[in-house]
Image: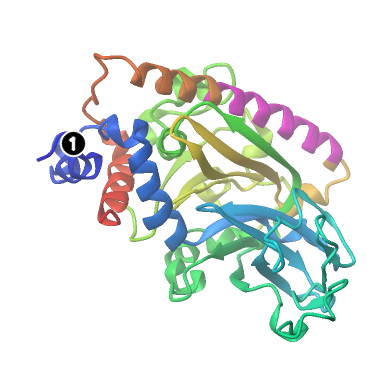
Amino acid sequence: MNIHDPAAELRANVALPFEEARAMPTSVYTSPEFLELELEHVFAKSWLCAGRVEGLKAPGDYLTMEIAGEPVLILRDREGQLRAMSNVCRHRMSVLLEGSGNVRVITCPYHAWTYSLDGSLRGAPAMDMNKGFCKEAEGLPPIRCVDWNGWIMVTLDPDLPDPHEQLAEVDDLVGYLDMSSYVETFREDHLWDTNWKILAENFMESYHLPMCHGGTIGGAVDVRKMTCPEGKAHFNYHHIMKDDSIALSIAHKGNTTLQGDDRYRTWLMAIYPSLLITLTPGYFWYLCLAPVAPGKVRIVYGGGLHPDFAADPQAEAHFAALKGLLDHVNDEDRGCTERVWKGMQGRLATPGFLSHLERPNYEFARWIAARMP
């Protein structure tokens, strides 16, 4: 094995059975070359989440993202259809829109070429003397985009199976909660000083909850009752049982549909590579991860309420309580994951053996390794 080849190191790492497994080699986090492989072979060839569908309600509502360096624009067109397309002008290749907002037309900030909400070129000033120019041929290239259970899923891969097919087993697990019905109440953008996989792995295991989240949710979790089953081809998951110390974690008192343990069960799902969902009978929250550099990750952080709580007369108070809790939890995770990144820079840093509660991390490592050239 070439010790300077992070992909080879990772393949050797995951060749061991789970009962003997260690955490991923430090090189797969710190190597810029490995990040380039991830962008090309993981992010450019996967379904990625841009956020919640309800975030684009009205015609002209839009948001932007990058996939492996490709600027992407997602919007609601005039007919109410969800669309994704290139966010690069067909003239001199300026980025068209930034952030999120609402537009009637898409106007290039460089030379004022304008596009309709379906991506067709609407106007191109002072182009009438170029005999080769054909307005009908200069629309924005479309990009695959679907609504999957209320999530906006986008991919650059024209041949990737639809997420309704690829992720059908998610419905088998949590379909009874109907993710599409949950009401988003906040969405924020963050930039953290850690590797994207460190944050993903942190979400995948609940082993860290009692210590890292001792000031918030750690006390509501019993590690002896955690289950970490074998994951699926395109995601891993586990669930934890929470008590009623956090009211929003359990089913609304008026909910008569959920019975028994289903009223207390919290699901944690990692949709590969970078959509991380916590789903409870009372609320949900999520992270969408996009690597910027080996030690920097851009995060879409959002969440909201189960429709029972959203319709409650005290919904505003429920939201305030939820947001305060999740912000605190997120701050705790930031501290933990940024410390891991800092520790990885040490000469004596080596990956340790995994607990039985970290099976999702092992499966995540195997999934990444399988996509490396």
- Relative to 278, 305 lies left or right: right
Residue at the image position 71 percent from the left and 71 percent from the top: 82
Q: Quadrant of the N terminus?
A: top left
Give the residue displayed 27% in from the left and 42% down from the top.
362
Percent x, y of residue 337: 47, 25
138 left or right, relative to 105: left
Q: Which residue is mark 1?
A: 21
Say which residue appears at 33% left-offset and 61% top-offset: 233
| Magenta range | 316-333
219 is higher (above) or lower (below) than 45: above
Residue occupying image coordinates x 58% and y 16%: 215
Q: Nearer the viewer, residue 122 or 24?
A: 122
Residue situated furthest left in the rendering = 1
Give the total of numbered labels: 1
Is 320 in the magenta?
A: yes
Q: Amino acid at mark 1?
A: Ala
Query: Residue 304: horizontal and vertical position, in percent?
Result: 71, 45
Depth order, front residue of 183/298: 298
Which quadrant of the figure contains the C terminus? Answer: bottom left
Res. 229 visible in picture: no
Q: Overall secondary structure of the magenta stretch?
A: helix
